[in-house]
Structure formats: C-alpha cells, structure tokens
Image (cartoon, grey):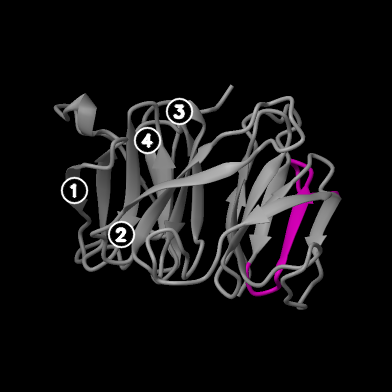
Amino acid sequence: PGPHRIRMSPYDEEKRLWLIDETGHIIYVFSNDGENLLMTLGEKNVAGEDETHYAQPQDVAFLPDGKFLIADGLRNTRIVVRNADGSYRSEFGERGKEAHQFSSVHSLALGPNERLYALDRDNRDIKVFQQIAAHDSDRYPDYEYVTTWGGLGMPLDITVSEDSAWVTDLNPPKIVQFNLDGTRHYSWNLPTEGPDFWIEMHSLSVDVNGNLYGTDNQAGRPQMLSPKADADPALIVKRPYIPR
C-alpha cells in the first residue's frame, strides 16, 4: 500500500510533487519540499467512477497548457482529463478485450505529434491515441484511438522520446524498445541473480546525464544504471519527450 507513482510536471516552475496513491484511491499534490499539501483529487479510501472519485488510480501525464490526464486505473478503466485547477473536463476509455479497450490503465506517456501512449498491464499491450481537437476549442484535448502494440509479457511502465518508446516488461523482466511506428527494435533482459538482480522494473526515469533509474516494487528498492562506454547510442533509453 502507498504511492504507486511520483510525478512532476515538466512545465511547473515550482516543481510540485504528484503522489498517486493507488490503495487510497486518491492523488495528492505537494510543494517540492513536501511540507505543504496543495491539492487533493479523490476521496481517501473511497473508490468510485464519477467526476470526483477514482478506483486505484495509477499515473498522471501533463499537457503544456496545465491540463493533465489521470490513468484510472485498475478497478476503473478510463483516462480522466482535468483542468489545471483540478476541475473535471472529460474522460474516455472502456473495459474489454478488444484492441481499443482496456483491462487496466497502468501508465501514460505523451509523444511527438500529439500522441498519447496508454499502457494496459492486464491486456499486455500499449494503446496509442491521437489528439484531434484544435488547441483553442472546447473539445481540447480529444483523443481518438489509433492502434495497439502487443506481444508483451506484463508491461508496467512506458517512456517515450522523440523517436522511440521504452517499456518495462515481465516474463522475464526486461526493457523493450519500440520504434514509434510500433515495430519492436530491441529488447534487453534484466539480471535476475546477483547483487543487481531485478524481480520487476516497475517504473523508470532518465536523468540529464543518461543514467536510468528503475524501481522494483517486489525487491523493495531502486537501482541506477549508467550507459556502457561502448553502448550504441540508438539503444540507450532517452529522456522523455516534452510536448510544446
């Protein structure tokens, strides 16, 4: 139990911290030092599917104008769009096994050309959506289903750069690289024995120096991985794309 993810908007000069509490069905926004609670989304320990409640929310992604998307989540199967002040705007997504449907919404990433990548852990795939509304319209953002990337074991997190997507996966634990047309480019198995073993890489992030940080929920620890000196730059996990 506790926070499922910690996020920070790349557009926020105050660098506020967003804590997504899956088990509490709630999202907290704190000041960067953690001293002040600035916003609460949802009601603690109360699950729901209306405009003010969530059921095991998983992630949040940020748009340049302050709006944000919530992956909601495991018990619900929807993506909720909210305004910068936290007020409800819209939602989309439905439960099912068809290519455009969700069994879960576990992670979100925004990529080039206004595309949204939604990781469906339980359907073991990635859903790709296209934003189709004019930015000055009341419909913005409005996402239309495009395609699904399958063939994964049990995907957990996704990050998207200008030219690739990287997915943390299980069975066995690994990182899978996709081209943005959905073709699989590379796969890197993580060690399962020794001091640097992994049970799962539940979340990943990359710093400005190219170091990769992964968290392992099952082993109860993070690890930092640095690129090998002779590594092919095309296979290194890159910093996330930031829409402008």
Mark with earlier residue (4, 3)? 3
- Which label belongs to residue 112? 3
Observer-side mark, 4 or 1, equals 1
Mark with earlier residue (4, 1)? 1
- Which label belongs to residue 97? none
**What residue do we see at 70% from left, 73% from top?**
24
Q: Position of residue 152 (x, y in %)?
A: 26, 60
Mark with earlier residue (2, 4)? 2
Q: Position of residue 15 (x, y in %)?
A: 70, 35
- Asked if labels 2 and 3 touch by Cβ distance under 8 angstroms, the answer is no
Please give the residue where the numbered disc 2 appears in the rendered image: 169
Above/below status of 90 relative to 14: below
Mark 3 surroundings within 10 Å by alpha-carbon count, few (fewer than 14), some (14 through 19), many (20 or more): some
- Which label belongs to residue 211? 4
**Magenta highlight on residue 31:** yes
**What residue do we see at 41% from left, 37% from top?**
160
Mark with earlier residue (1, 3)? 3
Q: Amino acid at mark 4?
A: Asn
Q: Which residues are magenta?
A: 22-36
- Asked if labels 1 and 2 touch by Cβ distance under 8 angstroms, the answer is no
Please give the residue where the numbered disc 1 appears in the rendered image: 187
Q: Is 193 situated left or right of 13 in this image?
A: left
Observer-side mark, 4 or 3, equals 3
Q: Position of residue 20 (x, y in %)?
A: 65, 59
Q: Secondary structure at mark 1?
A: strand
Q: Is 102 situated left or right of 70 in this image?
A: left
Mark 2 surroundings within 10 Å by alpha-carbon count, few (fewer than 14), some (14 through 19), many (20 or more): many
